[in-house]
Amino acid sequence: MTELDPALAARLKRTADGLVCAVVVDHVSSDVLMVAWMNDEALALTLSTRRGTYYSRSRQSLWVKGETSGHVQHVREVRLDCDADTVLVRVDQVGPACHTGTRTCFDTDDRLLLTDP
């Protein structure tokens, strides 16, 4: 098991399940590609391997983005937000980021909130 740096671990504010939200964006365009969850081990692995590694709440296990599909994420930067409860993961995405096969999980026509005209 890869361990998270103790200083970083002390700063993180996790959910009751021990998870932190990860917002994943394209390093060049800043488009939001996906949102996922990380536990301490997933964050530590992401930082050490520079591959997007997340925690699946449904399978209750770690998964490395692209491990089976080949649609990997090369992590360029990870930032902690001001409340220390969300990480921003900037990546070079190879292939689609969404499990539906689209570039981003946010490309549907479902607009629930206002957008600029």
Image (tube, rainbow, N blue to C red):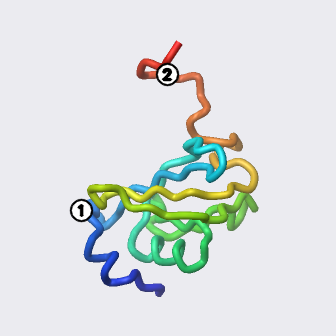
Mark 1, residue position: 16
Residue 36 position, x and y percent, is: 48, 54
Residue 6 position, x and y percent, is: 32, 84
Quarter of the figure with residue 52: bottom right
Label 1 packing within 10 angstroms: few (<14), some (14-19), many (20+) = few
Secondary structure, mark 2, is loop
Residue at horizontal 48%, vertical 61%? 56
Residue at horizontal 62%, vertical 62%? 65
Amino acid at pointer 2? Arg
Give the answer, above or below, for where 76 lies relative to 108. below
Q: Nearer the viewer, residue 93 or 2?
A: 93
Q: Earlier in the sequence, mark 1 or mark 2?
A: 1
Name the front one of labels 1 and 2. 2
Count of numbered marks? 2
Quarter of the figure with residue 67: bottom right
Judged left or right of residue 86, residue 27 is right
Return the mark for residue 111. 2
Give the answer, above or below, for where 88 lies relative to 48. above
